[in-house]
Amino acid sequence: MTTPERFSNSAIDLEGLKKQAEAKAGSAANGGGAGVAPTVVVTRDNIEQEVITRSTQVPVVVQVGTGRSPGSENMRAAFSDLAAKGKLKWVFAYIDADTTPELAQMLGVQGLPTVLALAGGQPLTSFEGEQPAEQLPGWIDAIVRACEGKLEGLPESAADGAADNDQPSDPRFVAAEQALDEGRFDDAIGIYDDVLAQEPANRDARKARDAARFSKRLATAGGGDAVAAADADPTDVDKALAAADAEIAAGHAEAAFTRLLDVMVTSAGEDKNTLRIRLVELFDLFEATDPRVIAARSRMASALY
């Protein structure tokens, strides 16, 4: 499975639960589609069904948090809001480390909050600590795109219920969103380009196009550790671009920006322009007021001029 940057399986052991979930295949494996909720609180009794089994159908984003941390609560609210709007393409599962510490321990959590994404009963990527709310949609989108066509999907009853609530903000984007759902990235990008040709200042179209480009790169990325490969050859532009995508998908935007800017300083000509274009695209995945974007834009201006 092509996924965002993986983390070591030694940090999380789900094999026991996965085997238990597989042993309960049948009606449980279908997850009672009509009753699927976009957000669920995880307990000892439902972790098999709502996390392990559910992740064989759609990606599951798990947050291990605590009500004692305002940052944790803010991120929980942000994930819940995104899940409610996510049309059941993914599910948000919350684990309270205070009331169920054994679950946090089972997942190998070292700090709170910790967020991890699972698909097919296996961990894909994770991050620790609060992240800006505006960064979360891009991270989730990358996970959903990476898993397209690789999971069972929810029963039609659940998917139909989600579709009934679908109200796209711009009707021109419906075809593009459908193309993305079907993995037709070039078609979606073309639609957004057509919108931009008519409305060059349409920021929504530009952000959607750049997100589609990012998703396409993740979905078509080769295997191996892109970050390690770039670290071993720090002047290689192509390796730096691939590593930056992996770092963005893993929630490490600042590291991605720094990597590309470091290579830009030592590059010239077409390589420098390629890095500039990619940085601008990655900036568009975030809010313009994000401090990391502001700092990176400033440094990029210095590197260019």
Image (tube, helix red, strand yellow):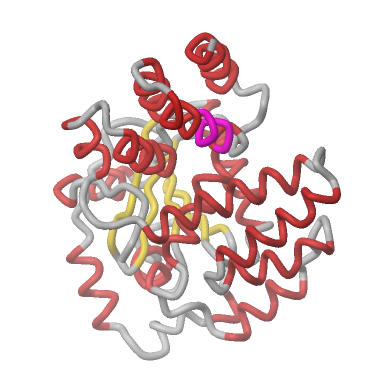
Say if 266 sits above or below 222 in the image.
Answer: above
Give me the residue at 23% from left, 74% from top: 20
Question: Is residue 251 rendered magenta in the image?
Answer: no
The number of numbered badges drawn on the structure is 0
Q: Which residues are magenta?
A: 276-281
Residue 282 appearing in the image: yes
Quadrant showing the C terminus: top right
Say if 12 sits above or below 268 in the image.
Answer: below
Give me the residue at 63% from left, 70% from top: 179
Say if 282 sits above or below 9 in the image.
Answer: above
Q: Find residue 101 and report its image quarter.
A: top left
Left or right: 236 as drawn, with respect to 140: left
Give me the residue at 55% from left, 81% from top: 33
Residue 97 appearing in the image: no
Spot occupied by residue 143 in the image (x, y as percentages of width and height): 45, 55
Spot occupied by residue 161 in the image (x, y as percentages of width and height): 70, 77
Say if 33 sits above or below 200 in the image.
Answer: below
**The one of 271 and 158 positioned closer to us in this rendering:** 271
Spot occupied by residue 109 in the image (x, y as percentages of width and height): 28, 39
Q: Find residue 266 and report its image quarter.
A: top left
Give me the residue at 14% from left, 48% from top: 10
Question: Is residue 277 rendered magenta in the image?
Answer: yes
Quadrant showing the N terminus: bottom left
Spot occupied by residue 244 in the image (x, y as percentages of width and height): 38, 36
**The one of 172 and 3 positioned closer to us in this rendering:** 172
**The one of 45 and 201 positioned closer to us in this rendering:** 201
Q: Residue furthest front?
A: 269
Main secondary structure along the magenta-highlighted residues: helix
Left or right: 79 as drawn, with respect to 8: right
Left or right: 274 as drawn, with respect to 49: right
